[in-house]
Image (cartoon, helix red, strand yellow):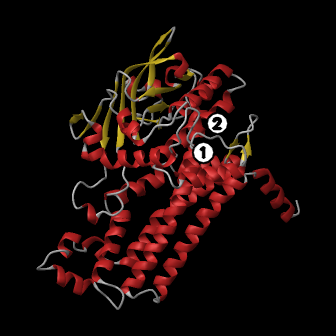
Amino acid sequence: MAMMTREEYVASLDDGRRTFAEGEEIKDLASHPQFATAISLVGEGYEQNYIPGDDASGPYFRIPHSPGELKEILELLADWDMVTVTTSQGLLALITAATRMRADYPELADRIEKYFDYCKQNDLRCVQAITDAKGDRKLAPGQQADPDVYTRIVERRPDGIVIRGAKLHISSASVSHELVVMPTKNMKPGDEDYAVACAVPVNAPGVRIVNTSYAPRERVEDFPVSGKFNMPEGFIIFDDVFVPNERVFLDGQTEYSAAFAHALGLWERLGGTAHMAEFADQLVGLAQLIAEANGTERIPHIKEKINEMVIYATMTRAGLEAAIANAELSEEGWCFPSELYTNAAKHYAAADYSLMVRHLHDIGGGSILTAPSIQDLQSEEVGPFIEKYMATKEGISGEYRLRLFHAIRDFTADAYGGWQLVTMLQSGGGLYAQRMVARKHYDMDHAKKLALRLAGL
């Protein structure tokens, strides 16, 4: 057991993995500009957490045993890069699935625990590959014209399985070490080949990753958020990839296919709510700052919009706190967040996020999109005029206001902002999935008894 340094992490990416961007295969990932920021962020995470010694391990490889420990992990995750966060959440999702299937399939549950330890001992970073291409959504996996549009087992061998398919929307896949494959939904009898969960190294033969990015390449000073915090989005292709038995966690057991999706949804929704609580505070801060810079902070409708944003931020964080405070223990003594409060909080935060962004845009005004670039501000000829006309009052320089506008645009109204808007809705599954899970775990019998008592029945 030993932790990796930043340098060892960067070196670990040179392992023969096949990754593509903009039509070309990337031979040297660490030197490619599209991946430079992501690799730097993950490298900083390794550097931040590194402890020397053969018995050391990262705090992200930790299973909570109480609500207090769960809260500690979430607080630590807030300071880590997306890949480290994804690693923690994904492995906890696997552990959650193990608890749910242990009684019927103890061998599969044991494989998950051993895999957790393997990642911990080697300080690996993992991403969860769950969303399939899906083809015609009206048809079950086995009814599709192309049977590969859902990832499936195409061959079973004595020593393992061979899988084929694709997984979409997999953030940071190319800069991680492991791909944790899970069924995208509940599989029914007849679709046993699609009930597959397993772990695949990124550099396994037959794996190819096609990347897209919302990150800017030029004028990074005009992109103060996405220029510093971005990750490649991976379209993963599994072209007859062999997976040894010890890395197979589900092989045709359709009755447990949904356990993986539900477990991942729980942890992704908890992490997403924590992320959105921070985002909500940032939106409030931007709204108040730009209102003050514009001189509109005392206008009633501006104040009212910011008040609504404050309530949104507070209620999102309250839902997060409730999910932790009402955490549940498994038979193993492992602590999992409340299904009810996690799903209700994530739904609330995601459903109203776009409204909060709308308030910010309404408060900020058109210069969110049309403010001149920082390079224009630095021009000897036009720069002084930009400084003059972008300034508003004493203490509010043209540069200060200009940089606020660029931060708002980059954060909410450009490629990164659009990525976040969709991510807020879709992370951990869409709004409908969160409504269903919240309804399932709500104490409806108690509510009915209260209503009957009220009615005198």
* Marking on residue 389: none
Residue positioned 23% across, 86% down in the render: 389
- Measured as percent of width and height from the top left, residue 112 is found at 60, 27
Q: Secondary structure at mark 2?
A: helix
Label 1: few (<14), some (14–19) or many (≥20) C-alpha neighbours in 10 Å: many
User: On the picture, is 400 further left or further right than 200?
Assistant: left
Name which quarter of the figure residue 58 lies in. Answer: top right
Q: Residue furthest front?
A: 53
For badge 2, the amino acid type reads Thr
Q: Is residue 21 visible?
A: yes
Q: Nearer the viewer, residue 73 or 389?
A: 73
User: On the picture, is 22 further left or further right than 147?
Assistant: left
- Measured as percent of width and height from the top left, residue 217 is found at 23, 54
- Classify 451 as above or below 56: below
Residue positioned 41% across, 56% down in the render: 420
- Classify 304 as above or below 168: below
- Classify 71 as above or below 290: above
Residue positioned 88% across, 59% down in the render: 457
First reached walking from the N terminus: tag 2 or tag 1: 2
* Marking on residue 266: 1
Q: Residue furthest bottom?
A: 394
Q: Residue furthest right?
A: 456
- Looking at the rendering, in which quadrant would you find the N terminus? top right
Q: Could you tell me if the residues under marks 2 and 1 are in contact, i.e. CB atoms within 8 Å? A: yes
Residue positioned 41% across, 54% down in the render: 422
Q: Nearer the viewer, residue 211 or 26?
A: 26
Q: Secondary structure at mark 1?
A: helix
Q: Is residue 171 visible?
A: no
- Measured as percent of width and height from the top left, residue 322 is found at 68, 58
Q: How far is the residue under mark 2 from the one under mark 1?
A: 9 Å
Q: Which residue is mark 2?
A: 96
- Classify 56 as above or below 427: above
